[in-house]
Amino acid sequence: MIPRYSRPIMAKIWEPENRFRIWFEIEAHACDAQAELGVIPKDAAKAVWEKGGFDVDRIDAIEAEVKHDVIAFLTSLAEYVGPEARFVHQGMTSSDVLDTCLSVQLSQSADILLDDIDNLLAALKRRAIEHKLTPTVGRSHAIHAEPTTFGLKLAGFYAEFKRNKNRLQIARDEIATCAISGPVGTFASIDPKVEQHVADKLGLKIEPVSTQIIPRDRHAMFFAILGVIASSLERLAVEIRHLQRTEVREAEEFFSAGQKGSSSMPHKRNPVLTENITGLARLVRSHVIPALENVALWHERDISHSSVERVIGPDGTIGLDFALARMTNVIDKLIIYPETMQSNLDKLGGLIHSQRVLLELTQKGMTREESYAAVQRNAMPVWLEGKDFRDLLKSDKAIKKYLSSKEIDSLFDMAFHMKHIDTIFSRLFEE
C-alpha cells in the first residue's frame, strides 16, 4: 500500500525487518525443540539465539543470485551464527517458515484491526447516544419515508460493526495456525513435537493437517471478512456522503481551518474523507476473489497463491486499518444539523405520517383498500402542488366520516415514532 494510505503501526508488520524477525524466531524455536529431542546439539540451538541475526540488504543481494527468499535468509543467518548454522532448518521446508510467518503477520494485523473497530464502536456509541432523540427523516429508495432519529441511524451502524468485530475475531482465531510438518506435510523428517513447540512460542494453534502448506480456505475466510468490514465502512461512508449533499445537508464532515475544497471554487466543502473510504473499501473487497481462488492449489502445494498474498496481505490490512481509523475520525468530528433535519422532515407537508392515517382509518371501520385510496388521493396534491397534507385530510368528506379534526391532528405527533427508541438502545448498549 502506498504511504498516503498507510499508518506506521500496521505498515510495520509487513516490513522486511518484521518478516525476517519472525522467520528467525520460527527457526530458533524449532532448533530448541530439535535440541530437546536430541536431533541437534543443545549448544547449536543456543548459538542460534546468541549469535543469530540477519541483514535485509544482504538477504536481497543473495536472493538476486539464488532466486529463493528462504535460502537467502538462511545464508544470511549462517553468516552470523557460524558453523552451528548447519543444524538450522533441520527437516523443514520453506513453507513451514513462510506459512507460519504469514499466520503471525495476519494475527498481528487482526489485533490492530480489532482495536480499530473498538475505537469506531466507541465513536458511534457516543454520537448515537448524543443524538438518540434527534428527529430526522428515514428514507427508502432515497425518498422520504417515516421519521426516525439520527441516533438510531448511528446505532444501526454500531450494531453492524459489533457483528464485524465478532466475525474478525473468528477469522483471527482461524488464521492463527502453525505448520512445521516438512515436505508434503507427513512429518517424515521432523517430529510433530517441534511444530507444537513453535506454535506454543508464537501463540498459534497447530495445523491439524497441512499438506506442505496451511490450507488456503483459512486465508480465504480472513480476507472475506476484511471485505465484509470494508463494505460496512462503505455503507456508512455513503450515508454520510448523501447527508452532506447540498440539497440534504443534515450532516457533514468536519472542515478544518485552512482546508480547501476545490482548486477553482472557493466555496466548496466536499465529503473527501468518506469518498476516500469508499475507494479504499473497493480495494479491500477486490482482494476477496483472489483469496478464494487461492484455495484450489495443485496437489500438496504450488506457489500460485504466493504472489497474490504478497500483495493482498499488506494492502488489505493496511488499507482497512487506514479506512477504519479515518472513519473513526469522521464520526468523532461529524457536524450534525438538527435544524436542517427538522426542515427536511417538514418539507413534504406531513406526508411522512401517511401510514398512521391509513391504519387509523382501518381501525375506525374503513377497508384497507378504501383507506389506502383515500390517503393516497390526498397525498398526491402535496407532491405535485405543495399543499398541506393535514388540511387536505380534514377537507376530505370520506375521511371526515371516520376521523375528526382533533383525531387527525393526533396522528401527526412526532413522539409516536420515538416511543420505542429507548427500548432499542437498551437492548443494543446494555447487552
Image: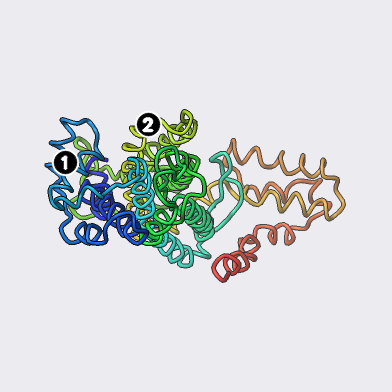
Measure how far apart labels 2 and 1 are at the Cα level. 21 Å
Q: Residue at x 35, y 46 (%)?
A: 102
Against 335, is 219 above or below?
above
**Residue 117, picture quadrant:** bottom left
**Residue 302, picture quadrant:** top left
User: From the image, which quarter does the N terminus lie in?
Assistant: top left
User: From the image, which quarter does the C terminus lie in?
Assistant: bottom right
Q: Position of residue 30 (x, y in %)?
A: 33, 54
Under circle 2, the secondary element is loop
Toward the bottom, the furthest residue is: 430
Q: Which residue is mark 1?
A: 59
Q: Amino acid at mark 1?
A: Ile
- Residue nearest the viewer, comparing 257 with 388: 257
Q: Mark 1 packing: few (<14 Cα in 10 Å), some, or many (20+)? A: many
Q: Amino acid at mark 2?
A: Ile
Q: Earlier in the sequence, mark 2 or mark 1?
A: 1
Q: Position of residue 359 (x, y in %)?
A: 77, 52
Q: Position of residue 74 (x, y in %)?
A: 22, 44
Residue 328 located left or right of residue 211:
left
- Residue nearest the viewer, comparing 3 with 412: 3
Q: Position of residue 245 (x, y in %)?
A: 40, 43
Residue 8, numbered circle: none
Residue 303, numbered circle: 2
